[in-house]
Image (cartoon, grey):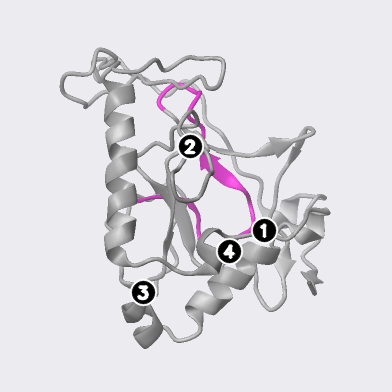
Amino acid sequence: MVVEIPRWTNAKVEVVNNEKFNPLMQDIKKGKPRFVRNCFPHKGYIWNYGALPQTWEDPTCLHSETGARGDNDPIDAIEIGEGVAKRGEVKQVKVLDIDDVKKHYPGLLDATKHWFEVYKIPDGKERNEFAFNGECKDKAYANCIIAETHEAWQKLIHAKIPHKTETYNISVENTSVEGSPFRVESEPLKVTETHEVMREEDSEDYNGKWYFV
């Protein structure tokens, strides 16, 4: 898992898949950096939040069970270990079964569902709704979704399907995928640009208040 947003932070940072080598960048909306609001009783994100590499939700495919299209990004993942991760850290993670989470972290699933339901409300948006009537799916189901989205990524990175369409535009250059026509040599690569993430306390767009929603 690539950590985009460490626990208890608010800056909305994500993998940008239309930039070369898919860097992490803070999301900008109307020229301003985005922050997630603090929905009582939480502070920012309540787990380490990130993306699973080598997965892709194909926006041209309609999911047979949910009726939703892919969001053109890697699969989102939440890491519930005890440590607070660092942004950009690559963490080894494993898929957990729902009963294990209920047993060892009682209350976390309910808190997670509530967080995802309300976190956009302070910005004037509606409550989020969930597929499967909000039921948490098990480990086997999650592994199937990971396999499906990995297969979609494989097709993308090996040019089995186009990486530029009217729907999406993805930078597929890479330094390590065997057999990919987009693979480039790593030696000549240099970091030519860095992307700073604005801290909450340095931004006038973050107020630090609790929202009771």
Which sits earlier in the primary sequence, circle 3 or circle 1?
A: 3
Q: State the image quarter where residue 46 is shown.
A: bottom right
From the viewer's perspective, is residue 179 above or below residue 9?
above
Which sits earlier in the primary sequence, circle 4 or circle 2?
A: 4
Camera-nearest label, 1 or 2: 2
Q: Residue furthest left?
A: 178
**Kind of residue at disc 1:** Asn
| Residue named by callout 1 | 128
| Residue named by callout 2 | 62
Compute the Cα span from label 4 to label 3: 20 Å
Camera-nearest label, 4 or 3: 3
| Residue named by callout 4 | 45
Find residue 67 and report its horizontal and vertical position in percent: 53, 45
Compute the Cα span from label 4 to label 2: 29 Å
Camera-nearest label, 1 or 4: 1
Q: Is residue 94 visible?
A: no
Instruction: Tell which of 117 and 92 is nearer to you.
Output: 117
Compute the Cα span from label 3 to label 1: 21 Å
From the viewer's perspective, is residue 24 above or below residue 159?
below
Q: Residue furthest front?
A: 64
User: What's the mark number on residue 98?
Assistant: 3
Q: Residue at x 60, y 43 (%)?
A: 197
